[in-house]
C-alpha cells in the first residue's frame, strides 16, 4: 500500500491542508493519506490547543473521505515530533507499506536541515505540494536527496492556520476557510477566541 503522511500541528486544520492531501493522493497514486498531528514540531512553537482538540478537528475534517485517516502516534509518544522517529516506528508497524511524506513546496528547499534527513531519504519519498509556478531548487540538493523528491501542484489558496487564529481572535469569520464540521467544532468549543498569536 502506498501511504502519504500529512504531518503538522493542524492548529487548526484548514482547506489548504485538505487540498494538499488530495493533490498528493491523486498526483502520486497513493492509496491513503494519514493525517498525523504533531506533539511539538521541531521548527515551530507548540500548538495553542491540546493534541486531543487538534486530532478531533482533523477527524471532523476528513470524516467523509474513505482514503483519509488519522494517526495519533506523535501525540502518544510526546516530546518533540521528529519525523525520522515517527517513520522508523511506522515502518516497524507497517513493514509492507511504502511511505510518502507530504510537505509544502516551500519546505522542500530546507529539507537538508531536517533531523536525520539522509536516513529519511532512504526510507521514504517526499511529496512537495505547491502552487503552479512554485520554484523548487532540486538542482542544488545533495545527490542522495534529488531522486527522493516529487512535486505535485494544487489549486491556489492563501490560507494559513496563523491567519485563521488571528481572524478568530479578532472576532472575524473563518467560514469556508475550514471544513464545515471544523467550523462548527471551533465555534461550539470556543477555542482560539482569546488567541492573540
Image (cartoon, rainbow, N blue to C red):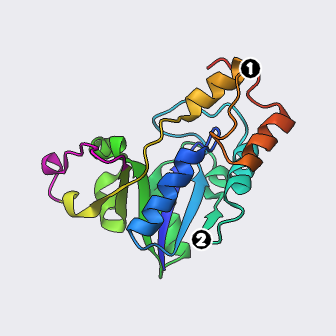
The residue depicted at 42 percent of the width and 50 percent of the height is 103
Query: Is residue 163 depicted above or below 1 in this figure?
Result: above
> What residue does disc 1 label?
171
C-alpha distance separating marks 1 and 2: 34 Å
Query: Along the horizontal axis of the image, is 67 left or right of 169?
Result: left
Looking at the rendering, the stretch of residues picked out in magenta corresponds to: 130-143
Q: Is residue 67 magenta?
A: no
Query: Is residue 14 depicted above or below 28 in this figure?
Result: above
Residue 124: quadrant of the picture: bottom left
> What residue does disc 2 label?
67
Q: Position of residue 29 (x, y in %)?
A: 42, 74
Q: Secondary structure at mark 2?
A: loop
Query: Along the horizontal axis of the image, is 89 left or right of 51?
Result: left
The residue depicted at 24 percent of the width and 42 percent of the height is 135
Q: Secondary structure at mark 1?
A: loop
Mark 1 nearby-residue class (10 Å; few <14, some 14–19, many ≥20): few
Q: Position of residue 197 (x, y in %)?
A: 61, 20
Q: Position of residue 104 (x, y in %)?
A: 40, 46
Q: Position of residue 191 (x, y in %)?
A: 78, 31
Q: Is residue 140 magenta?
A: yes
Mark 1 or 2, nearer chain start: 2
Amino acid at each position: 500500500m502506498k501511504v502519504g503522511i500529512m504531518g503538522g500541528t493542524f492548529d487548526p486544520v484548514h482547506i489548504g491542508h485538505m487540498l494538499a492531501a488530495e493533490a498528493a493522493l491523486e498526483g502520486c497514486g497513493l492509496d491513503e493519506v494519514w493525517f498525523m498531528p504533531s506533539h511539538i514540531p521541531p521548527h515551530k512553537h507548540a500548538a495553542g490547543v491540546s493534541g486531543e482538540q487538534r486530532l478531533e478537528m482533523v477527524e471532523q475534517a476528513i470524516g467523509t473521505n474513505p482514503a483519509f485517516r488519522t494517526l495519533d502516534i506523535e501525540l502518544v509518544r510526546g516530546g518533540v515530533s521528529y519525523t525520522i522517529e515517527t517513520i522508523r516506528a511506522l515502518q516497524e508497524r507497517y513493514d509492507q507499506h511504502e511511505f510518502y511524506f507530504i510537505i509544502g513546496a516551500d519546505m522542500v528547499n530546507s529539507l537538508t536541515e531536517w533531523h536525520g534527513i539522509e536516513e529519511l531519504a532512504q526510507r521514504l519519498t517526499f511529496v512537495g505540494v505547491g502552487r503552479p509556478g512554485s520554484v523548487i531548487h532540486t538542482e542544488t540538493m545533495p545527490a542522495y536527496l534529488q531522486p527522493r523528491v516529487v512535486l505535485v501542484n494544487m489549486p491556489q489558496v492563501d490560507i494559513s492556520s496563523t491567519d485563521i487564529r488571528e481572524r478568530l481572535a479578532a472576532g472575524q469569520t473563518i467560514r469556508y476557510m475550514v471544513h464545515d464540521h471544523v467550523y462548527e467544532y471551533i465555534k461550539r468549543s470556543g477555542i482560539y477566541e482569546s488567541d492573540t498569536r
